[in-house]
Amino acid sequence: KDGFKPEEIRRILKVCNELNIVVELSGAKERWFDKPANDWVKEYFKVFYEAYPPIKKYNDEFVSALLLFAPKELDDILRFKIGRQYFPYRFTDYGIDLRCHPVYKTQGINDVLNYIGISRDNALAIGDENSDVCMFEWCKYSACPSNGSDFAKFKSQYICKHIDKHGVKDALKHFKVI
């Protein structure tokens, strides 16, 4: 429900444009790029196999999250130019999530479990990044695909198949969910 203020979106887009950073904007029901894909976007999509969203101009629509396609070398300048009031999370070599509020995975899991009436003693967390370890500590069961980070694999109870080789299905079978 919380989104960026339109004037802040315009300011962030200006900063990103100056640095040749493509931005994916996520609204209530759609997502879009602010400009055509560049090499950084192409590097990102070598890891995350998704369809490119359409390109369109920002027109003060509701936006809850921004995905910035930029290399790690730009992290410090982005932090300085965008400001510390936002919560950037670099989750891959060319991907930075930017949100108005911090995202706590354990809180999200807890909210979902409460909603569907399942205790965390019956929950399985599957993740592949260091940021997913908090989920492993929250849920009784945990799995990390073989393509995950070394730390996530170390902290998980089970290392399942590579995500592209039906890793989630492997984890679900291992823990007798299916």
Image (cartoon, grey):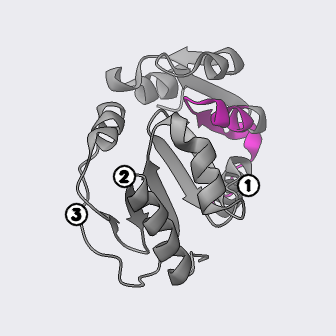
Q: Residue at x 63, y 44 (%)?
A: 76
Amino acid type of the residue that numbered disc 1 sits on in the rendered structure: Gln
Q: Residue furthest front?
A: 18
Given residues 66 and 128, the one toward you in this image is 66
* Among numbered discs 3 and 1, the one appearing first in the sequence: 3
In the image, which disc is placed on residue 20?
2
Indicate the amino acid at tag 3: Pro
Nearer the observer: mark 3 or 2; the answer is: 2
Q: Would residue 118 be found to the left or right of residue 94 on screen?
A: right
Q: Secondary structure at mark 3?
A: loop
Q: Is residue 63 visible?
A: no
Q: Secondary structure beneath disc 1?
A: helix
Residue density around tag 3, few if under 14, some if 14–19, many if 20 or more, within 10 Å: few
Q: Which residue is mark 1?
A: 107
* Quadrant of the rendered image containing residue 120: top right
Residue 88: horizontal and vertical position, in percent?
62, 52
Q: Residues within 10 Å of mark 1 (few under 14, many from 20)?
A: few
Q: Earlier in the sequence, mark 2 or mark 1?
A: 2
Point out the image quarter for the N terminus: bottom right
Q: Nearer the viewer, residue 84 or 127?
A: 84
Q: Residue at x 34, y 40 (%)?
A: 40
Of callouts 3 and 2, which one flags the residue occurring earlier in the amino acid sequence?
A: 2
The reply to whether callout 3 and callout 1 are in contact (CB within 8 Å) is no
Percent coordinates x, y for residue 167 in the rendering = 42, 24
Can you give x and y, in whole percent of width and height, for residue 101 in the image?
68, 64
The residue stretch that appears in magenta? 116-136
Dot 3 and dot 2 residues touching (CB under 8 Å): no
Q: Amino acid at mark 2?
A: Asn
